Amino acid sequence: MNRTPSLADRLGHVTTQATFVQAALLAAHGAGARTGGFRASDVRFFFLLFTNWVEHDVTRPSQDIDLTQVRRTLERLCRSRWAEPRDDAARGRKSPRGQRYVLTEEGVVSLAEELADLDRAPLDETLFVACFAASYLEAVLARVRGQAPALSTPARRRVARMLDPSRILREARRSTAAVLADLEERVRSSLVFEEAARDALAKEASAEEVARRWESLGSYQLHRVRPLAEVLLGLPDDLRRFELEKGMGVRARLLFEPLAERTRAELALLERLEQQLSSREPTRR
């Protein structure tokens, strides 16, 4: 019996796990400096290692990448001049299995920038990237083209800035604070809407009147896509009644408040980690 591919299968794990693929490429490049480059199998190993660090082998056991996906990614990088293939000198010919690659300076810088672009990323990815930067930054900075010469000074500075663990945590903290502010406003406005609907329904107001009352209290976040009154009045009777009587309160208590509580904990964690990292920076060489 054929199984319909999941959405993740159709999109490809390289897309859904981009953070870990980018880190795996940088790590494989650094590790392969003494052997004339890295192989696709090296990238997959680091991918599995890094996803293991964040427990994805437990929480997302089906999200692996195979060697074919890695090779296709490397081919795209070569076309973009972010990587270069190296001939296997021992074989005297190119072999898909033994083919080695190196990242160009442009590739190192670009992958570092993409890895550090964590706007609204999940906490596990943010913590992973900060940990990766603290662990592998020096190795990444020390190598280019699969040998030992240093990156150019401008490239070193750019990569060092992008993969600075303190910067990563600081940007994550700012993003998380913005999410928390949004969730707290959702909780507040939902409870205001709930009270307004209760008062209006007690006076036997129509659904349209309640919707207009809600709109007078402030627009909801998708009002540019479809007005709230249009959404509400277009619902079936049972769903409209639920929205009028309970919907706002249910979302506030079962969704927005728990998410806000979790986000507060994440924000506190990021603030503590940032402070810990800052307190140790003067002693770092």
Image: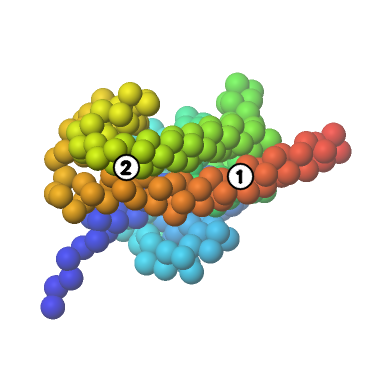
Dot 2: element? helix
* Residue 73, percent from left and from top: 35, 47
* Residue 154, percent from left and from top: 60, 21
Most foreground residue, 11 or 59: 59
Give the tally of numbered discs: 2
- Residue type for callout 2: Ala
Which residue, as the protein is rendered here, is positioned at the far right? 283
* Residue 226, percent from left and from top: 21, 30
Residue at image coords 20%, 37%: 206
Report how far apart the C-alphas of labels 1 and 2 lie in the structure: 36 Å
Residue 202 - label: 2
Residue at image coords 19%, 33%: 208
Most foreground residue, 76 or 49: 49
Residue at image coords 28%, 46%: 243
Residue 264 - label: 1
Classify residue 173 by image quadrant. top right
Residue 172 - label: none
Q: Is residue 118 above or below residue 124?
A: above
Image side of residue 30 versus residue 9, left or right: right
* Residue 153, percent from left and from top: 64, 23
Is residue 271 visible to us here?
Answer: yes
Residue at image coords 37%, 25%: 218
Image side of residue 232 versus residue 102, left or right: left
Most foreground residue, 55 or 98: 55
Pointer 2 local density, CA inside 10 Å: few below 14, some 14–19, many at least 20? few
Most foreground residue, 267 or 157: 267
* Screen quadrant of the N terminus: bottom left
Is residue 100 visible to us here?
Answer: no
